[in-house]
Amino acid sequence: MTPAAGTTPVRITVNGAVHDVEGAALDAPLLYVLRNDLELNGPKYGCGLGECGACTVLVDGVAARSCVVPLGHVLERDITTLEGLCRGDRPGPVQQAFIDEQAAQCGYCLNGMVMTVEALLRRDPCPSDETLRRELHYNLCRCGTHLEILCAARLAARHRR
């Protein structure tokens, strides 16, 4: 049975750890819970409409826009944030590829780009350039580092093989 909003802690699994969130409304955007309650600041608030991709997380390994996913929809599912891709104190392979290719500028889109590439490589470890472009098409970048982002995605794919 799903607990009523605000009366019982809501249990969610984020980055492999179980969290009981007190006073959370089930219709609250997952992004708010991640940032405000769990202090995970990898996912960013961008447009708030699920269009820019800055808030992207993985839900059961699939990229999802956490600003439009209600908390009640992710109960008993595995959520991974940018922080969850790290290996101890080291960046994960996709994150390292973005660092190596200097694909980060302002950081607005970075979370979404990394999480989208991570989700893609989990289901397709050898994506074509066309697939990479299609997957990243809906992640907005205002800095113009599109070429570096594509290079980082290709590097991450090569490292994953």
Image (tube, helix red, strand yellow):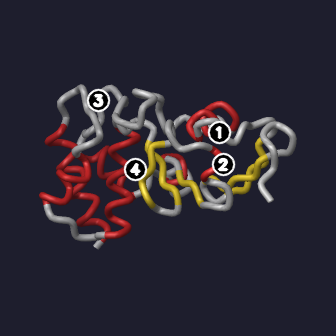
Check if mark 3's residue and mark 4's residue have beta carbons within 8 Å.
no
The residue drawn where x is 86% and y is 40% is 7
Give the label on residue 115, or none.
4
Cβ–Cβ under 8 Å for marks 2 and 1 = yes
Secondary structure beneath label 1: loop
Say whether disc 4 or disc 2 marks the residue closer to the N-terminus: 2
The x and y percentages for residue 5 are 78, 40
- Residue type for callout 1: Asp
Q: Nearer the viewer, mark 3 or mark 2?
A: 2
Q: Label 3 amino acid?
A: Gln
Please tell me whether mark 4 or mark 2 is closer to you in this view: 2
Residue 131 left/right relative to 2: left
Whether 97 is drawn above or below 32: the answer is below
Residue with the mark numbered 1: 27
Residue beneath disc 3: 105
| Category of crowding for the residue at label 1, using alpha-carbon neighbours closer than 10 angstroms: few (below 14), some (14–19), many (at least 20) | few
- Which label is found at residue 72? 2
Q: How far apart are marks 3 and 2 (CA)?
A: 34 Å
Amino acid type at image mark 2: Gly
Residue located at (26% from left, 64% from top): 157
Kindly check if marks 4 and 1 are in contact, taking CB atoms under 8 A apart as contact: no
